[in-house]
C-alpha cells in the first residue's frame, strides 16, 4: 500500500481492518492505524512461501515421550485480525521452537485440543485422560501435556484421580507467551522433558520455581494451585513441599521421598465423571437462594469461611438439599489449613445437616474429586467416605 | 581536508531523548534513576530469539544469539513486576504521549490517526522481555534548513548496563522519544548543527530529562560506494561532527583497502589451520594458556590488515570486533607481529607452516576449540567483506569519536505488534489541544527585549533548568536581572565553593528574592542568606519564616539612623586616611562599612550616606 500523510508517502503492507481503521505495517516495521482513504493499493505481495518445516532430528537411542497438546500459552502466536495472542501451535511446532528437546528424548505428538484453558471442560479432561492412557499403554517412557495455565491445576487434578500411571505424566505451561524472547516456555518444556524421562511415577505440574531462570518445581497434581495472575512462579504446592525440582540449564531432577516412583503399579483408567457438580464461593451476606441454582445437582463443594462456615440461615436449605440427594462438601477459602466444623455452632449445625468436611483439600481439587467420586460410586454414603479418604494425594493425614 | 560533496556524504540522525514524566511509559513506577548500591534484589534470565511475525529470526537478533548468555538484573523498590517481565504492561502513559505530540507539533509533523505499540526485538539483555516497546506517533516534519524529519516514535528506555551481562532496571521503561531525520545532511558540521537545533526544541518543552545520558544521538553515515553505517550512542553534542568525519575517513580507508586487495587478486582461504602445537613453548601468555590456536590465511592481505582506517583503528581491529562475538579476547595478525610476546622466529615458523608468503597475512585466534573455531569463521567473514568494501553495520562510539563494530544493521523483521497494549486514537480535537511552547531561542530574545537582560544572560536563563523558577520570580515582581543573576551566577558560584545550594528549596529562593525586592535585605546579602538557608536546610518552619530567620541572623535590620552612626564612626576612626585620599576614600571605606552591616542595607543607600559624611568632613 502507499500511505500518504503530511506530504510524505510511505509504503507498507496492509494487515487488516479493525474498528473502521486500516492497519498498515510500514516498511520500517511499524504498524499504524489509518483511515482507509489515506491508503491506496500499489500491488499485491507475492504469496509468502510456507514457513520452512524445520526438521527435528530424532535420536533413536533416546527414550520415547508423548507430547499431548491442548493449547495455551506454551504454544501461542499473534492473530492479526484481532491483535490478540492466540493458541495456534501444534505439538510439532513446539519441537521446532525448542530444538534442544531433541537431545533429551524422541517425541510423538498428539493434539487433544487447541483451546485457551478457560474453555476447558470435564469432557475434555476425560478425552485427555484417555489419550494419556493410550500413550502409556503404547509404551512411552513419559507424557508431557502442554496446557494453558489458568485451569491447568483442575485438569491435572482430574487426571490425578482418573489415572493410575507407572510413568511420569507432566503438565507444563508458560506464563509469558511463546512469541517473546523472555518466554518461560522453553525452560519449562525442557525441564518437563527431564522429569518425563526421569524417576517420577505420578501426575504432576511443572513450572518455574522462582522468578529466576534457574529452577522448576514439580507439584503434585491434586495439591497445586495458580497463586499469581502473571508471575512465572505462580504455581505453588499447597500444604506440602513440591515433589521435587529440576535445575536449569543442567536439567538435573531431584525428587522428594514422597514423590511416587516410576514403575509403581500398572496403568489404569477410571474416566467416569459426574458433571452435575459445582463449586460455590461463599461471601458475607450471600443469600441462601443462590443454592436454588444447584437444585438437582449431584454434588456441591462450598468454599466456606475460616474453618468451613456459611451463614446460619443457609443451614435449613442445605439440609433440604442433602435430603434430596446432593452431596455437599465443605472446604475453606483460606486455602491453607484444614476444615473443622466441630468447633463452632454453625459448623456443628452444618455437620448435622449432612455436610461432609473436606479435610484440607483445595476447593478446586475437591470439586474435581467430587465429580470423579460421584461418577464412580453410586452409593452416597460410600461416596461420602471416599470424599474423606486420600485417593490421589489430595488429603494430608497431618497438617504440618 | 576531505571534500564531502565529492565523496557523496549523506548523513542522518536519530535523537533519543528521555521524557521527564511522573511515571514510566507502560507501568506506574516513577522515572527515577537509582544508585546500584540501593538495589533491593537481583534475578537472572536467559533470552532466546523467536520467530517474528514474518517467520524470520532477525539478523541482528541472530547475531546476538551467537552467545548463549545469562543476564542478571538489579531491581529496586521503585521498580515493579512490569519491568521484571512478570506482569503485562499498563496502557500507554498519556502524559508521555502528550509530550511526544507536543514535540511533533513543534517540528511541524503530522500525527498518525491511531498509534500502535510494537515489540522491537532486542535480545542483548537490555530489555527483560527481549523486546523494546515502541510506537510510531507522527511523520514528516521539517527543520529550518529544509532538512526533513521522517518520524517521531515514543518508546521505552532500555535497562542500563552495569557491566557485561548485568543490567539495572531503574532506567527500563522511562519514556523515550526517537526522532529520525532523513539522510539530508552533507557535511559533518551540518549534522552537529541539526542535532543542536533538535536538542533545543526538545528542551523548549520543559518536559524532557536533563543531564548526561538523558539524550543520545545515533548517526547514520554513508558515502558514495560506501555503505550505511549506524553509530549508536553519541552522548556529547560536540563530538558529533568528529564522529561523522572519522566514519567518512574509515569508509574511504576501507574502499582504498578494497581496491588494493582487488588489484593484488587477494583472497580468503576458508580452511582453518590448527597451529596450537607451534606455540607450545611460546613466551606469549595469551597463546600459552590457550587450548586451541587456529590460523586463518588471507592471501594478498599483507600490510593492509594493519593499515589505519581511523585514529587507533585498523582493518585488524574490525576483524577483532567480529571475532569477539564468539567470546574470544581478540586476534593476532602478522601485520602487527612480532609483538605481545610472540617472537620473530615464531612468526616465521607460523608463516612457513601455513604456507603464507610475504604478501599474505595470517590471523590467529586462541581460545577453547569451539570459540576459536567460531572466531576464525568470523575473521573470514569480515575478511571477505573487505574484498567488497564497506559492510552495513551498527557500530558503537569509542572515546574521541572512533567506532567499533556492534552488530549488523537490523532489518524490518524485528518488529511485531505488542498485543497487550491497546491502540490509541489521535483525533483532531486531541491534536488541537496540544499547546506549542515558545522555543528557547525565541524566549532568550524576548528576555532581552522585555527584561533588558544582556544576550548572554538571557540565553543562559532561557536554556537553564532554573527557567521555571526565574519566570515565577519575575511574575512575583522580582527584578529580572536580580532573579537571573541569583539563580544562575550566584547559585553556581556558591555551589562551586561547596555550599549545598541544591538543598535550598524553590519556595525559599522565591521568598528570599521577594524579601530583597521588598527592601528587607540588600542584594549584597543574597550569597550569605543562601548559604545560611543551605546550612540549616531540612529545619523546621515555612519557607517564608526560614528566610526571615536567615535575614535576622545574617543581615539583621539596620535603621537609617544606625547606618548614619556606623558610617560616622568608621569615617571618624579613619579620618587621617579620609583627609589624605579625599573623595577617593569612598571606595575603600565603602567595603569596610558593608562588611560591618553585612548586606542588611542596599549598597546604594550606604554609598550615599558615606558620600554625605565624607563631604561633611572634607568641607
Image (cartoon, rainbow, N blue to C red):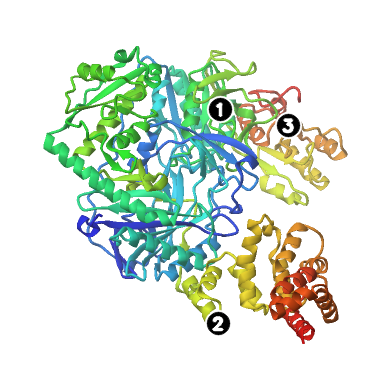
- Residue at x 83% of width, y 69% of height: B552
Residue A106 seen in this snapshot: no
Query: Closest to the observer: A183 or A385?
Result: A183
Q: Are marks 3 and 2 in contact (CB under 8 Å)?
A: no
Per the image, the residue denoted by label 3 is A358
Horizontal side of residue B280 vs B537, given as left or right: left
Instruction: Answer few, some or many: residues within 10 Å of disc 2's Cα (few below 14, many 20 plus, some between 14 and 19).
Output: few
The answer for how far apart the CA atoms under marks 3 and 2 are is: 82 Å
* Residue B378 image position (x, y, % from top left): 30, 31
Instruction: State whether residue B339 is above or below residue B73.
Output: above
The answer for how far apart the CA atoms under marks 1 and 2 are is: 68 Å
Query: Closest to the observer: A357 or B396?
Result: B396
Per the image, the residue denoted by label 2 is B450
Task: Establish whether labels 3 and 2 are both on one chain.
Answer: no
Residue B430 seen in this snapshot: yes
Per the image, the residue denoted by label 1 is A215
Q: Which mark is residue A365?
A: none
Say which element carries label 1: strand
Say which element carries label 3: loop
Horizontal side of residue B245 vs B510, given as left or right: left
- Residue at x 34% of width, y 12% of height: B280
Chain to which mark 3 belongs: A
* Residue B99 image position (x, y, % from top left): 51, 65
* Residue B173 image position (x, y, % from top left): 53, 51
Q: Residue furthest bottom?
A: B619
Instruction: State whether residue A314 is above or below residue A363.
Output: below
Q: Quadrant of residue B258?
A: top left
- Residue at x 52% of width, y 44% of height: B160
The answer for how far apart the CA atoms under marks 3 and 1 are is: 33 Å
Amino acid at each position: 500500500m502507499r500511505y500518504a500523510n503530511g506530504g510524505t508517502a510511505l509504503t507498507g503492507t496492509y494487515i487488516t481492518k479493525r474498528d473502521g481503521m486500516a492497519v498498515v505495517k510500514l516498511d520500517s516495521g511499524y504498524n499504524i492505524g489509518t483511515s482507509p482513504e489515506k491508503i491506496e493499493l500499489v500491488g499485491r505481495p507475492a504469496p509468502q512461501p510456507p514457513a520452512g518445516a524445520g526438521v527435528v532430528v530424532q535420536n533413536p537411542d533416546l527414550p520415547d515421550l508423548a507430547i499431548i497438546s491442548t493449547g495455551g500459552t506454551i504454544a501461542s502466536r499473534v492473530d492479526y485480525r484481532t491483535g490478540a495472542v492466540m493458541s495456534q501451535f501444534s505439538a510439532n511446532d513446539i519441537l521446532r521452537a525448542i530444538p534442544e528437546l531433541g537431545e533429551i528424548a524422541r517425541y510423538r505428538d498428539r493434539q487433544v485440543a487447541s483451546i485457551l484453558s478457560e474453555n476447558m471442560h470435564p469432557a475434555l479432561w476425560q478425552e485427555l485422560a484417555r489419550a494419556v492412557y493410550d500413550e502409556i499403554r503404547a509404551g512411552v517412557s513419559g507424557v508431557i501435556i502442554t496446557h494453558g495455565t489458568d485451569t491447568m491445576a483442575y485438569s491435572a487434578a482430574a487426571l490425578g484421580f482418573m489415572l493410575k500411571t507407572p510413568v511420569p505424566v507432566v503438565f507444563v505451561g508458560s506464563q509469558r507467551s511463546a512469541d517473546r524472547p523472555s518466554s518461560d516456555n522453553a525452560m519449562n518444556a525442557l525441564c518437563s522433558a527431564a522429569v518425563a524421562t526421569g524417576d517420577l511415577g505420578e501426575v504432576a505440574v511443572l513450572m518455574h520455581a522462582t522468578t529466576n531462570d534457574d529452577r522448576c518445581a514439580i507439584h503434585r497434581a491434586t495439591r497445586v494451585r495458580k497463586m499469581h495472575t502473571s508471575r512465572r512462579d505462580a504455581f505453588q504446592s499447597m500444604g506440602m513441599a513440591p515433589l521435587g525440582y529440576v535445575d536449569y540449564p543442567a536439567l538435573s531432577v531431584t525428587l522428594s521421598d514422597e514423590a511416587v516412583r516410576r514403575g509403581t503399579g500398572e496403568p489404569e483408567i477410571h474416566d467416569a465423571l459426574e458433571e452435575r457438580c459445582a463449586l460455590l464461593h461463599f461471601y458475607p451476606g450471600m443469600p441462601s437462594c443462590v443454592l436454588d441454582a444447584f437444585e438437582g445437582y449431584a454434588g456441591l463443594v462450598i468454599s466456606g469461611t475460616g474453618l468451613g462456615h456459611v451463614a446460619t440461615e443457609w443451614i435449613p436449605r442445605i439440609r433440604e438439599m442433602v435430603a434430596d440427594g446432593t452431596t455437599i462438601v465443605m472446604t475453606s477459602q483460606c486455602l491453607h489449613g484444614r476444615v473443622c466444623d466441630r468447633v463452632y455452632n454453625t459448623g456443628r449445625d452444618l455437620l448435622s445437616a449432612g455436610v461432609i468436611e473436606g479435610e484440607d483439600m483445595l476447593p478446586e481439587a475437591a470439586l474435581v474429586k467430587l465429580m470423579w467420586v460421584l461418577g464412580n460410586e453410586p452409593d452416597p454414603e460410600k461416596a461420602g467416605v471416599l470424599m474423606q479418604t486420600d485417593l490421589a494425594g489430595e488429603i494430608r493425614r497431618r497438617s504440618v | 581536508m576531505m571534500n564531502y560533496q565529492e565523496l557523496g556524504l549523506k548523513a542522518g540522525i536519530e535523537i533519543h531523548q528521555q521524557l521527564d514524566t511522573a511515571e514510566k511509559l507502560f507501568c506506574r513506577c516513577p522515572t527515577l534513576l537509582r544508585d546500584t548500591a540501593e538495589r533491593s534484589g537481583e534475578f537472572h534470565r536467559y533470552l532466546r530469539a523467536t520467530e517474528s511475525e514474518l517467520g524470520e529470526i532477525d539478523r541482528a537478533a541472530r547475531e546476538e544469539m551467537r552467545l548463549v548468555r545469562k543476564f542478571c538484573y538489579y531491581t529496586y523498590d521503585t521498580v515493579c513486576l512490569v519491568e521484571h517481565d512478570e506482569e503485562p504492561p499498563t496502557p500507554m502513559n498519556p502524559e508521555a504521549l502528550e509530550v511526544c505530540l507536543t514535540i511533533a507539533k513543534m517540528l511541524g509533523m503530522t500525527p498518525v490517526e491511531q498509534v500502535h505499540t510494537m515489540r522491537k526485538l532486542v535480545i542483548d539483555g537490555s530489555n527483560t522481555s527481549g523486546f523494546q516497546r515502541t510506537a510510531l506517533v507522527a511523520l514528516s516534519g521539517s527543520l529550518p534548513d529544509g532538512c526533513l524529519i521522517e518520524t517521531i516514535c515514543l518508546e521505552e528506555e532500555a535497562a542500563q548496563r552495569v557491566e557485561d551481562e548485568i543490567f539495572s532496571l531503574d532506567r527500563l521503561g522511562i519514556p523515550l522519544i526517537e526522532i529520525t531525520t532523513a539522510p539530508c545532511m552533507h557535511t559533518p558540521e551540518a549534522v552537529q548543527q541539526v542535532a543542536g537545533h533538535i536538542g533545543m526544541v526538545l528542551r523548549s518543552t520543559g518536559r524532557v530529562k536533563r543531564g548526561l545520558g538523558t539524550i543520545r544521538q545515533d548517526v547514520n553515515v554513508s558515502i558514495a560506494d560506501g555503505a550505511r553505517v549506524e553509530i549508536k550512542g553519541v552522548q556529547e553534542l560536540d563530538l558529533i561532527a568528529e564522529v561523522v568525519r572519522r566514519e567518512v575517513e574509515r569508509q574511504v580507508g576501507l574502499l582504498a583497502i578494497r581496491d588494493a586487495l582487488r588489484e593484488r587478486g587477494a583472497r580468503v582461504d576458508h580452511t582453518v589451520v590448527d597451529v596450537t602445537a607451534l606455540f607450545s613453548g611460546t613466551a606469549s601468555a595469551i597463546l600459552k594458556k590457550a587450548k586451541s590456536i587456529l590460523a586463518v590465511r588471507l592471501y594478498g592481505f599483507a600490510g593492509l590488515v594493519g593499515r589505519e582506517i581511523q585514529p587507533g583503528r585498523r582493518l585488524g581491529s574490525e576483524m577483532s570486533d567480529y571475532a569477539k562475538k564468539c567470546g574470544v579476547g581478540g586476534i593476532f595478525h602478522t601485520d602487527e607481529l612480532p609483538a605481545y610476546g610472540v617472537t620473530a622466529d615464531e612468526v616465521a615458523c607460523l608463516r612457513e607452516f601455513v604456507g603464507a608468503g610475504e604478501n599474505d597475512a595470517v590471523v590467529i585466534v586462541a581460545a577453547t576449540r569451539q570459540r576459536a573455531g567460531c572466531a576464525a569463521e568470523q575473521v573470514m567473514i569480515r575478511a571477505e567483506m573487505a574484498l567488497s568494501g564497506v559492510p552495513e553495520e551498527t557500530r558503537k562510539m569509542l572515546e574521541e569519536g572512533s567506532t567499533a563494530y556492534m552488530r549488523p544493521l537490523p532489518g524490518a523483521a524485528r518488529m511485531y505488534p505488542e498485543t497487550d497494549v491497546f491502540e490509541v486514537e489521535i483525533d483532531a480535537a486531541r491534536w488541537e489541544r496540544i499547546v506549542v511552547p515558545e522555543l528557547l531561542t525565541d524566549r532568550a530574545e524576548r528576555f532581552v527585549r522585555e527584561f533588558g537582560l544582556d544576550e548572554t544572560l538571557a540565553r543562559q536563563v532561557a536554556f537553564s533548568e532554573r527557567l521555571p523558577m526565574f519566570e515565577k520570580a519575575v511574575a512575583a515582581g522580582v527584578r529580572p536581572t536580580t532573579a537571573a543573576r541569583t539563580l544562575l551566577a550566584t547559585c553556581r558560584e556558591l555551589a562551586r565553593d561547596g555550599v549545598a545550594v541544591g538543598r535550598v528549596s524553590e519556595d525559599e529562593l522565591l521568598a528570599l528574592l521577594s524579601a530583597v525586592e521588598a527592601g528587607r535585605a540588600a542584594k549584597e546579602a543574597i550569597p550569605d542568606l543562601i548559604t545560611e538557608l543551605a546550612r540549616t536546610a531540612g529545619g523546621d518552619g515555612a519557607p517564608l519564616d526560614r528566610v526571615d530567620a536567615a535575614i535576622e541572623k545574617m543581615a539583621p535590620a539596620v535603621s537609617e539612623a544606625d547606618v548614619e552612626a556606623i558610617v560616622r564612626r568608621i569615617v571618624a576612626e579613619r579620618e587621617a586616611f579620609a583627609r589624605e585620599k579625599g573623595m577617593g576614600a569612598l571606595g575603600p571605606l565603602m567595603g569596610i562599612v558593608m562588611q560591618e552591616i553585612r548586606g542588611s542595607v542596599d549598597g546604594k543607600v550606604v554609598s550615599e550616606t558615606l558620600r554625605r559624611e565624607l563631604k561633611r568632613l572634607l568641607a
